């Protein structure tokens, strides 16, 4: 199971670009807010500005499906980031049915996921933000960000994200969070790798309150009256 | 009514992919009641058990649910009681539910069709209409359990705030219904109660030995009230609105009108025109204290075939419930007030009543689905009509209950 705060997106750029002769370098980014406080759980992704690299990405090997679980009537993780063209697996760990639906975004779906480890695979072949809900448990909310690049990650509790062995080119760096109060919930800037030291990026935008995925009712045997 | 049940059963057997599930509650209870004989058995006692000690199967409730792949589901709920006052087993609810997916603008449509409660109670939210908070329901919800059930259709339009980055959800509902033409009779003739018994769909409710039933003003009235019958072939309606604040609570407000034609009386069953406003709120207070409060105010009218008011009552009740859970422990306190004001001139049928009640309940979660609950109920009331049955006008009743409740 993927825990939200512990998500590690291993980047496999090293496999993709074996011809690059440069030593394996890690590029570290730190995302802070206007009060210099580290921002955790922010999606960070790098898109090469050079078209040639974009073409090469299409030849990426198949990745294991990314999973989003329904656990204790919550989407876990709250934010999932994945590359366009790959498969997302929905897994219901609860002993009740969930009725998952997409509320917005390029991929629209709805299905009932029965109790006890029922699964459903969906391929996301268009980049964009998909916000999800459960039609039975309205407090549940989850987000999928589908990106058109293999270079993505999520900041840890220290606001840090690491990209290993990525091509040394110029990128557009996007920082995204569903509650980030900017245009398209995104903050962008241009960066060029390799980085000699951690690049600190200050996001001068406010964050909306992250919704608690919790019902007011704490009794388990409710009938939905 | 049986026809509906058959429709539900046939629907549930169709070959569409569906999930079938059963949920149940078994509530075994030991009670000690200090008071008079229960209203449930034709007395004027406010609790469901007669005076003295009683070991009972206080509720055996079972809900069978079919959930199809589409937004439709159906459920049938049966309840059984072996309680020393009125044993019985039967259906309490049976309906089909439609719960559409929200549209892009956050609007969602729900519909419910069948035998159901009007959506009013904020306490009775658990399996088979049980309450997770107390063993005995508030006066308002005890009345709903006794006299309210209808065959009808309810349509709800909801606006989900999360589609607009808002914490506020709003909904409006409208229901039309039949089979609730005698509602108000029991509230008039035995008054408010603090109970945990739901009337089964086939049951009739015994009246107390009111002298007016023997050659008095109520000579034409049958000895039992038949609560879920249709006498005038008119539809009643219930509208209500709800405002939910995510993570905080909700407010609701509604109006119920059974729209009965009071000129009709059949087989000793009079048609009662019953109308009321209701309001409710539920809030999560600091220190994880849950607050639930409901209020109801309305009137009921029963007339002779000559259109003379036989019963014309106003009534109101309100309760405030506070509940707090500490891991396996839950403590709930409820205070309430209730009254009935008799506005008619019928000399031998005084329905005036006034009272208040206090409930303290402690629940311990023994296992995941097994609870032990101890509860104390205190109720004092003034009801002058008790005098004609040689009972005191002012009366204090108390009840101690110890229950094991098993949910699955």
Image (cartoon, rainbow, N blue to C red):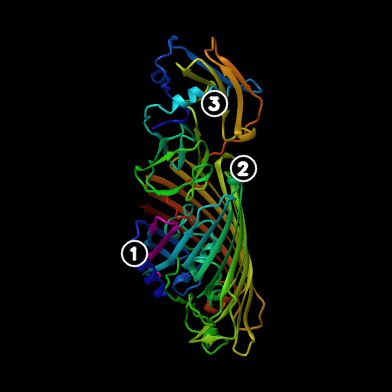
Is B152 part of what is drawn in magenta?
Answer: no
SS type, badge 3: loop
Chain letter of mark 2 equals B
What separation in Å lies between label 2 and label 1 (alpha carbons)?
A: 40 Å
- Within 10 Å of disc 1 (Cα), the crowding (few <14, some 14-19, many 20+) is few
Write the residue at 47% across / 26% down: A55
What separation in Å lies between label 3 and label 2 (alpha carbons)?
A: 21 Å
**What residue sits right under mark 3 in the picture?**
A40
Question: Can you say whether B102 is above or below A105 in the image?
Answer: below
What separation in Å lies between label 1 and label 3 (alpha carbons)?
A: 50 Å
Res B55 seen here: no
Res A114 label = none
Query: Which of the pair B346/B159 is nearer the observer?
Result: B159
Write the residue at 66% across / 28% down: A205
**What residue sits right under mark 2 in the picture?**
B165
Q: What stretch is highlighted in magenta?
A: B66-85
Question: Can you say whether A181 is above or below A22 in the image?
Answer: below
Query: Which of the pair B36/B66 is nearer the observer?
Result: B66
**What residue sits right under mark 1 in the picture?**
B14
Question: Can you say whether A71 is above or below B147 in the image?
Answer: above
Is B84 part of what is drawn in magenta?
Answer: yes
Residue B374: give x, y in percent of width and height. 44, 52
**Contact (CB < 8 A) between labels 2 and 1?**
no
Q: Earlier in the sequence, mark 2 or mark 1?
A: 1
Residue B129: give x, y in percent of width and height. 45, 60
Residue A188 occupies which quadrant of the picture? Answer: top right
Q: Same chain for the residues at labels 1 and 3, yes or no?
A: no
SS assignment for the magenta stretch, majority:
strand
């Amino acid at each position: 199971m993927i825990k939200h705060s512990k998500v590690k997106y291993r980047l496999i750029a090293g496999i993709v670009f074996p011809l690059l002769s440069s030593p394996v370098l890690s590029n570290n980014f730190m995302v802070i807010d206007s009060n210099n406080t580290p921002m955790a759980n922010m999606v960070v992704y790098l898109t090469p500005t050079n078209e040639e690299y974009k073409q090469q990405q299409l030849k990426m090997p198949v990745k294991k499906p990314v999973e989003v679980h329904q656990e204790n009537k919550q989407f876990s993780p709250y934010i999932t980031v994945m590359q366009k063209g790959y498969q997302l697996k929905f897994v219901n760990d609860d002993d009740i049915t969930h009725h998952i639906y997409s509320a917005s975004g390029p991929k629209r779906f709805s299905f009932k996921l029965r109790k006890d480890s029922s699964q459903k695979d969906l391929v996301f072949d268009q980049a964009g933000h998909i916000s999800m809900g459960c039609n039975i448990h309205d407090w549940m909310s989850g987000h999928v960000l589908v990106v058109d690049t293999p270079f993505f990650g999520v900041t840890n509790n220290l606001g840090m994200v690491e990209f290993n062995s990525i091509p040394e080119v110029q990128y557009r760096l996007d920082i995204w969070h569903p509650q980030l109060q900017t245009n398209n919930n995104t903050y962008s800037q241009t960066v060029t790798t390799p980085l000699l030291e951690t690049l600190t990026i200050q996001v001068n935008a406010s964050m909306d309150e992250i919704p608690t995925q919790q019902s007011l009712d704490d009794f388990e045997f409710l009938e939905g009256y | 009514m049986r026809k509906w049940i058959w429709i539900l059963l046939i629907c549930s057997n169709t070959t569409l992919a569906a999930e079938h599930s059963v949920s149940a509650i078994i509530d075994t209870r030991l009670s000690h009641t200090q008071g008079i004989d229960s209203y449930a058995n034709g007395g004027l006692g406010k609790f469901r058990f007669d005076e003295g000690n009683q070991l009972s199967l206080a509720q055996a409730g079972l809900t069978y649910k079919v959930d199809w792949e589409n937004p439709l589901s159906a459920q049938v709920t049966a309840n059984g009681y072996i309680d020393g006052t009125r044993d019985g087993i039967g259906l309490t609810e049976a309906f089909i539910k439609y719960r559409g997916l929200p549209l892009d603008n956050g609007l969602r449509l729900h519909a419910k069709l069948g035998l159901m409660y009007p959506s009013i109670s904020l306490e009775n939210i658990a399996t088979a209409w049980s309450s997770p908070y107390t063993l005995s329901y508030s006066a308002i919800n005890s009345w709903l359990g006794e006299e309210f059930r209808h065959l009808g259709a309810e349509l709800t339009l909801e606006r989900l705030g999360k589609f607009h980055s808002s914490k506020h959800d709003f909904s409006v509902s409208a229901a039309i219904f039949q089979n609730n033409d005698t509602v108000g009779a029991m509230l008039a003739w035995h008054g408010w109660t603090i109970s945990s018994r739901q009337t089964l769909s086939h049951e009739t409710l015994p009246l107390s030995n009111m002298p007016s039933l023997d050659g008095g003003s109520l000579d034409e009235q049958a000895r039992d009230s038949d609560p879920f019958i249709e006498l005038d072939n008119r539809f009643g309606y219930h509208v209500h609105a709800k405002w939910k604040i995510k993570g905080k609570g909700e407010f609701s407000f509604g109006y119920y009108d059974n729209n009965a034609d009071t000129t009709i009386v059949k087989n000793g069953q009079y048609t009662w025109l019953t109308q009321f406003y209701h309001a409710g709120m539920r809030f999560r207070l600091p220190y994880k204290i849950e607050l639930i409060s409901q209020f109801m105010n309305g009137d009921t009218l029963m007339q002779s075939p000559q259109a003379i008011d036989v019963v014309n009552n106003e009534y109101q009740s309100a309760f405030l419930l506070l509940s707090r859970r500490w891991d396996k422990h839950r403590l709930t306190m409820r205070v309430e007030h209730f009254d009935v004001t008799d506005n008619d001139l019928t000399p031998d049928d005084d329905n005036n009543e006034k009272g208040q009640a206090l409930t303290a309940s402690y629940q311990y979660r023994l296992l995941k689905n097994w609870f032990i609950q101890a509860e104390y109920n205190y109720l004092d009331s003034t009801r002058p009509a008790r005098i004609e049955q040689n009972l005191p006008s002012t009366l204090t009743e108390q009840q101690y209950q110890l229950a094991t409740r098993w949910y699955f």
